[in-house]
Amino acid sequence: MTRRTLEDVPSLENAQRPSRRNPLRRFCLGAVVGAILLAIALGAGLGVGLKKKSSNAHPSLASMSSDGSDRNVQVPPASNFVLRGQQALAQEPATTRYYDFVLEQRYGAPDGFNKTMLVVNGMYPGPTIEVNSDDRIVVNVTNLMPNATARGTSYYDGTNGVTQCGIPPGSSLVYNFTLDGWVGSTWWHAHMSTQYTDGLSGAFIVHNRTEKLVAQVDGELSIQLSDLYHRFSDDLLVQYLSRAGMTGEGLAGVTQGNETNRFNSSFTNYTLVANSTYRLRLVNTGSFAAASFSVDDHPLTVVEADGVLVEPFTVSSLDIDVAQRYSVLLTTNQTAGAYWMRYTVSQDAFTYTEQSGNYDILGVLRYGVDDAAMPASSEPGNSSAVDSLPAFDVGQLVPADAQNPPAPNQSVLYFLAVYENTANNNWLAFVNSTSWSPLQGQSTLLDGWAATTQGVSTNDSQLVVTIPDSDETQVVQVVYNNLDDGDHPFHLHGHKFWIMGQGQGRYQEQALQEQNPMRRDTVVFPAYTWTVLRFVADNPGVWIMHCHLVWHMASGLAMQFATLPQATAELVAAAPRVLQEQCASLRSG
């Protein structure tokens, strides 16, 4: 991976450093905030080949038109994130749904702070995809790769260097795929380096026609939570990987693209119907920070995690790690009025903070009152019924559709080590002894790694575990020992896994949960702990397993599983020629 030097990055000032944190292993938060952006999410990959452009360019040079208007990023109104919902879509027959995505670099201020952004169709958050699970999705992408992880077409998974090489500047690619029954709350986003940090993300909602939850729901909203940076992510990455580490970058917080109190922007707000139940589809689309979400005086009933319905339980607030998704039910049965939605940015992972930082982001939810009504006070609500509710704990998650995992017939063991000093004085992340870096103009899937490797294949930048063909179903058990002092939310493409167990220290054959363990596709590996995952390797392709903290993935914290080599080879042989042509173009360019 070609990276610029530290001298190319502007210096940062005004940071305060807590002495207890290691600046080389964590990240700094300057003018912080978070973001409530109403669009939903999961993890659909996008890979884009972009020419470099200075993040310090004046807006008239970077992206604005001569009149300074039509080249600005547009923030969609809150009404854009009121979903049609399952009740409406379930009445429609299976169909093909078409979307056109155009990627551009524009100048925008989603939180009131002007900066260069990468956006789809001129807006941030990007367009929402809302479909039924039996629909076909066709997305015509110009210089962008959006897609959902789709069985049978893994070459549309959109991961740079793994399933594709990226769409060269000025080129297009048509994604044409089905979801094979996948349902739930998800998101599409760029999957090349740190691009989604600059704005390439949007909601992806997949409805289950027969989901029984629909009888309880009167409406659906998508709510996207994110840390938002005030500088271009390329610049931040250069400094983050340097020997000095990150030293004072600022974030900004938004609520549906608008945040107040810092940069003269406005609150996101919803006017709902009283005595109704709404499904809030929440996702943390951030780059580094975990988030806590709540609504004053309203309990939240958790019903979904990463596309898996769970036995309902009620909490006062919900903690959401990066790339994780939850659905909660909220009933508008309190006194008519306006209430604060709160998004609190976790400060645990940050080395540096600034006094100007804003860690508590607000939005407005109202019913039974005028559309302009606002909460009387910025102080948290004091409902005793809500305050007495238990705190959210991932241990409360139990799949509503009980499944006991099959016994494993393949087992692998991995160690995570983050930010070891390398020969060139950069800090990188490692899975075992490999620090992942995307192959330039190449793809492990299209290059046939699944067919040509046996067992575990490694080089300086690729750790690929091939799950061999077999007459019996291949069930893989993966043990991760996190040797780092930080938490890591890991996401597996192409599969859901069972979380068989977690605990302090290293795994030493501790007892596992064999009865209906939680299933999902994103799990947090806490600092200095072990985690055992199990999944059925029945989806042909090469699938990346990576930390979803963008700075950690960009520094190498990723590996790959190559499943069903024979079927994968047949799949690659049938892949559109344009994929190989675009790889060749990027190699020669």
Image (spheres, rainbow, N blue to C red):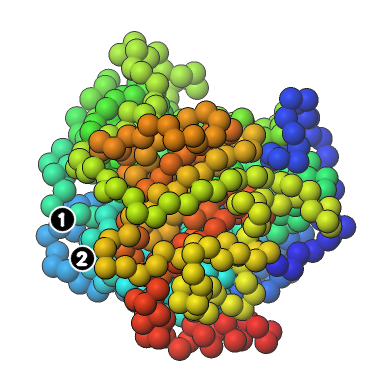
Q: Residues within 10 Å of mark 1 (few under 14, many from 20)?
A: some
Q: Is residue 514 left or right of residue 208?
A: right
Residue drawn 84% across the image and 57% down it = 424
- Between 167 and 369, the residue placed more toward the observer is 167
> Looking at the image, how many numbered discs can be counted on the residues?
2
Judged left or right of residue 397, residue 356 is right
Q: In which quadrant of the rendered image does the C terminus lie?
A: bottom right
What x and y, as percent, mark residue 108?
Answer: 61, 57
Q: Residues within 10 Å of mark 2 (few under 14, many from 20)?
A: many
Residue 579 in percent (x, y) is at 49, 82
Where is residue 86? Give x, y as percent: 20, 52
Q: In this figure, which residue is indicated by the disc labeled 1?
A: 209
Q: In the image, residue 24 lies at what x, y percent?
A: 75, 41
Instruction: Specify whether residue 530 is in view.
Output: yes
Q: Disc 2 to disc 1, how far (Cα)?
A: 9 Å
Identify the amino acid type marked 1.
Arg
Disc 1, SS: loop
- Give the image quarter of residue 488: top right
Label 2 sits on residue: 134
At 20% from the left edge and 65% from the top edge, which residue is drawn? 134
Q: Is residue 78 visible?
A: no
| Residue at 41% across, 64% down | 467
Observer-nearest of 74 and 351: 351
Q: Secondary structure at mark 2?
A: loop
563 relative position to 230: left or right: left
N-terminal of the pair, mark 2 or mark 1, is 2
Check the picture and name the quadrant holding the N terminus: bottom right
**Which of these two is toward me, 2 or 121?**
2
Tag of residue 418: none
Label 2–label 1 contact, CB within 8 A: yes
